[in-house]
């Protein structure tokens, strides 16, 4: 913990009462030190691991229980978020506790013990705590454990089900009643129910939370599920004494076919392994991390194991019914508990996977299901060596991640262990070490805030930076919602927050600039429609330049002081040219009302460029001052420009950049002709702060001072694009000239008739990745190797990986024919 762990930035969510109360108690018991706070969370995590081991070890050999426990603990460290624990682990603890109580309940029913109703009452009390803790955990538990209870009734295991149901309800009232009365007295119970359970817009709606996310997980893995079911049924059918050989042969054959179904996973895994090496600059451990064998694969593993447990439940029930065998109720309870744990994280995720935090219970359960009939551990002697090596390998990989990347959060990833050499003079951060930039961020910005505030000042952060309130011991908030992050705060509350902020402007605004974050959450949770937080963005965009002065900036953290009687005489700005992109509200209304283009400008319904007239109209709108920040455009046809007329660049000045997302959709712009009489910088897009993707510019001829085919200047990005043509100038680049942003997965096939030759980028080359050209760049961007089938393979590997991790724009694949590389249009 001394070596890189940092406190939460999201310490104070607007969560149900139990979460708030729990966090308040832990913070009070931490005496103002984050390292003590983390110790309490770590203690909770250790207790959970020990508790699960205790439960499993009662039913299988202790070595098997230990194997499950150590694997789960190791996999938990693969989580890119937190090794010590966070508030999400409490919901997992409640699920685990429910499973333990249900095991006791099952034993009591089997033994006809009068304690049965004691355990059902306790189960109800835990359910009540879930109700007060988090929406997703109570919803998942209600569905999953409810199905288990119904199953026990159907098979007549639970005969006095009505009495049990009443005792569960009475138990639930034990925690809910006092909290409910307290909220009711303070006229907050209705708000609690509405905010936590009725208004679910921040996660896409109740149906999407309960069933939509699970449906996507099952849909994405349907082949895997069918394969497992088919394999289990086939082996079960053939596994008789006289058919064992057939069974083993069938098993081997199906395993071979499995490669077809799960080939993408193993392709990713093998590619990662092949890329790992002993990097002289990074070392073996860093090399493992830098090549990606971490969080993405761990979530896949957890999702596959979760689905395996799900399939096992179905198989066990059918098998026992057909063969008239006795149900293994202990195994069923643990399997249902694992299902509830995984289901609750699926509900909360924007993506279709099971969170690694479920390893607490899912991994031990899976190990238990595998070895529950093998009481003699000596039977496992041969696999023990293999298992030990596997566990050791996973341990090295997971710990390497913690060294290289201690914590990841939207727009604010922690520095690696090797960079953390500094301490800070903030009391609550005693015991931690930071990188130099982190030291500046916490220490210098805190000094600024302290300099310009007193006990009565209001310090407000967006979308999640609240840690400075703790540093200052200042909890004055004029707003309504403590944290306005995009999948936490519902739309109507964000809009209400914007009104309150406008009426009571904070003395200090701490704005975290995270380009693309709003758009991604709109895609994942709003079907492409605007978030309520856009109202906050608009409020600050309107007042930022008139009512506030920028006094601090480190990285993507910007600190603004309200213009009042206190003069600005102290600032700390690490980059004077830094731009806070997300503090500017994208002005869409005038364009939407007058637009000649079909569409709505969202990712689901982008504005369509369907002709050269549409393309020229789009250019004229940008050059008239509409930057279209966050607005989506998609080209739907090949466009042939008039090569006899010099094209005016889209984004003709630094004051009029293009800030939206232009998706060429695999189509081309041909015949681009640009000639400057006064040595201008020229390209199809002149200035960009947005994104150009999937666009082909063919047979261009551009003559000026600094020239390029696709984009010339700005800090935007060009991704998955193709360019060919002739450049004539002082210097040039096939794709871009001076873009202070990523140029990724592009191909440049240009001829430079005059000027410094560069196939990809002419000047700024700090973030050029996986690009290829027909000429060797003197600045080592590209080797100039022949463009062939291997080039297409490398390009498509990046496309595949990008589309898995990002939702902002879908990259198209590449193909190669006799005319060269080209983008494959989406049908």
Image (cartoon, rainbow, N blue to C red):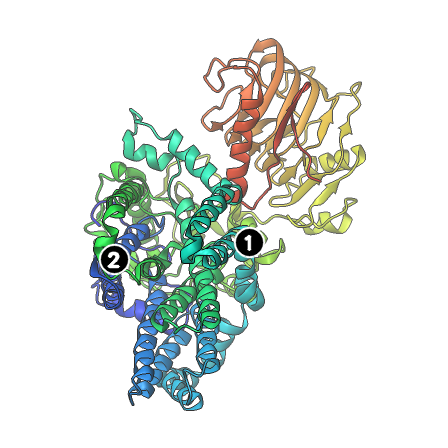
* Residue topped by disc 2: 64
Closest to the camera, between mark 2 and mark 1, is 2
Earlier along the polypeptide chain: callout 2 or callout 1? 2
Task: State how far apart marks 2 and 1 are (Cα).
Answer: 30 Å
Q: How many marks?
A: 2
Q: Which residue lies most toward the front here?
A: 242
**Residue 551, percent across and down?**
40, 45
Could you classify mark 1 by the number of other residues whose Cα lies within 10 Å: few (under 14), some (14-19), or many (20 or more)?
Answer: some
Callout 1: helix, strand or loop?
A: helix
**Residue 28, percent across and down?**
24, 68
Callout 2: helix, strand or loop?
A: helix
Residue displayed at 77% across by 44% down = 597
User: On the rendered image, what quadrant is the C terminus found in?
Assistant: top right
User: Which residue is more in the foreground, 720 or 689?
Assistant: 720
Task: Answer whether residue 508 is visible to the viewer in this image.
Answer: no
**Residue 283, percent across and down?**
28, 30
Q: Which residue lies most toward the top here?
A: 754
* Residue topped by disc 1: 222
């Amino acid at each position: 913990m001394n070596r890189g762990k940092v406190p939460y930035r999201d310490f104070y969510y607007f969560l149900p009462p139990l979460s708030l109360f729990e966090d308040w108690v832990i913070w009070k018991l931490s005496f103002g030190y984050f390292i003590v706070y983390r110790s309490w969370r770590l203690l909770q995590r250790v207790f959970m691991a020990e508790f699960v081991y205790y439960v499993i070890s009662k039913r299988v050999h202790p070595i098997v229980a230990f194997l499950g426990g150590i694997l789960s603990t190791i996999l938990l460290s693969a989580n890119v978020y937190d090794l010590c624990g966070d508030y999400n682990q409490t919901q997992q603890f409640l699920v685990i506790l429910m499973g333990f109580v249900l095991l006791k309940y099952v034993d009591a029913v089997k033994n006809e013990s009068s304690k049965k109703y004691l355990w059902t009452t306790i189960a109800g009390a835990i359910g009540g705590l879930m109700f007060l803790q988090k929406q997703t955990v109570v919803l998942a538990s209600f569905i999953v454990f409810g199905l288990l209870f119904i199953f026990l009734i159907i098979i007549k295991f639970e005969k006095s089900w009505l009495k049990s149901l009443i005792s569960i309800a009475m138990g639930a009232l034990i925690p809910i009643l006092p909290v409910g009365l307290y909220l009711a007295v303070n006229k907050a119970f209705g708000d609690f129910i509405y905010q936590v359970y009725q208004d679910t817009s921040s996660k896409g709606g109740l149906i999407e939370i309960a069933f939509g996310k699970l449906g996507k997980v099952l849909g994405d893995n349907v082949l895997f599920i069918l394969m497992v079911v088919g394999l289990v049924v086939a082996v079960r059918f053939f596994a008789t004494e006289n058919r064992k050989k057939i069974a083993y042969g069938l098993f081997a054959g199906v395993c071979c076919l499995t490669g077809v179904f799960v080939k993408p996973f193993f392709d990713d895994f093998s590619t990662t392994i092949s890329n790992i090496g002993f990097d002289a600059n990074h070392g073996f451990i860093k090399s493992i991390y830098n090549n990606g064998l971490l969080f993405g694969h761990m979530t896949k593993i957890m999702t596959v194991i979760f689905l395996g447990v799900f399939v096992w439940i179905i198989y066990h029930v059918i098998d026992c019914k057909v063969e008239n065998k006795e149900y293994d109720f202990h195994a069923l309870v643990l399997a249902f508990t694992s299902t509830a744990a995984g289901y609750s994280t699926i509900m909360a995720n924007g993506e279709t996977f099971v969170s690694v935090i479920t390893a607490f219970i899912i991994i031990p359960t899976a190990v238990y299901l595998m070895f529950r009939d093998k009481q003699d551990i000596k039977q496992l002697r041969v696999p023990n060596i293999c298992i030990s090596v596997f566990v050791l390998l996973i341990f090295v990989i997971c710990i390497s991640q913690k060294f290289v990347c201690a914590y990841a959060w939207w727009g604010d990833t922690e520095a690696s262990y090797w960079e953390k050499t500094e301490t800070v003079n903030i009391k609550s951060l005693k015991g931690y070490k930071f990188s130099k930039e982190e030291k500046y961020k916490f220490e210098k910005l805190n000094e600024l805030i302290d300099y310009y505030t007193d006990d009565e000042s209001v310090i407000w952060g967006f979308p999640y930076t609240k840690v400075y309130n703790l540093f200052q011991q200042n909890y004055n908030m004029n707003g309504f919602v403590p944290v306005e992050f995009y999948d936490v705060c519902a739309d109507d509350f964000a809009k209400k927050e914007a009104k309150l902020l406008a009426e009571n402007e904070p003395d200090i605004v701490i704005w975290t600039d995270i380009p693309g974050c709003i758009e991604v959450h709109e895609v994942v949770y709003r079907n492409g429609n605007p978030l309520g937080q856009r109202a906050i963005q608009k409020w600050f965009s309107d007042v930022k330049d008139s009512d506030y002065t920028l006094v601090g900036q480190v990285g993507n953290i910007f600190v603004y002081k309200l213009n009042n009687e206190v003069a600005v005489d102290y600032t700390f700005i690490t980059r004077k040219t830094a731009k806070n992109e997300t503090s500017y509200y994208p002005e869409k209304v005038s364009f939407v009302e007058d637009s000649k283009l079909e569409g709505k400008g969202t990712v689901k319904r982008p504005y369509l460029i369907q002709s050269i007239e549409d393309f020229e109209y789009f250019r004229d709108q940008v050059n008239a001052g509409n930057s279209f920040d966050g607005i989506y455009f998609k080209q739907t046809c090949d466009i042939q420009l008039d090569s006899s007329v010099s094209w005016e660049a889209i984004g003709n000045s630094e004051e009029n950049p293009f800030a939206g997302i232009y998706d060429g959709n695999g189509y081309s712009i041909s015949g681009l002709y640009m000639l400057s009489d006064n040595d201008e910088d020229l390209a199809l897009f002149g200035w960009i702060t947005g994104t150009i993707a999937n666009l082909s510019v063919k047979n261009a001829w551009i003559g000026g001072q600094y020239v390029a085919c696709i984009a010339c200047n700005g800090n935007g990005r060009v991704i998955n694009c193709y360019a060919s043509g002739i450049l004539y100038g002082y210097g040039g680049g096939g794709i871009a000239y001076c873009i202070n942003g990523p140029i990724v997965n592009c191909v440049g096939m240009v001829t430079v008739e005059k000027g410094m030759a560069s196939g990809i980028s002419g000047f700024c080359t700090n973030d050029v990745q996986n690009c290829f050209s027909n000429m060797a760049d003197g600045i080592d961007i590209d080797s100039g190797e022949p463009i062939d089938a291997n080039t297409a393979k490398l390009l498509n590997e990046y496309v595949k990986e990008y589309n898995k991790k990002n939702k902002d724009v879908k990259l198209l694949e590449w193909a190669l024919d006799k005319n060269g590389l080209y983008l494959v249009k989406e049908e």
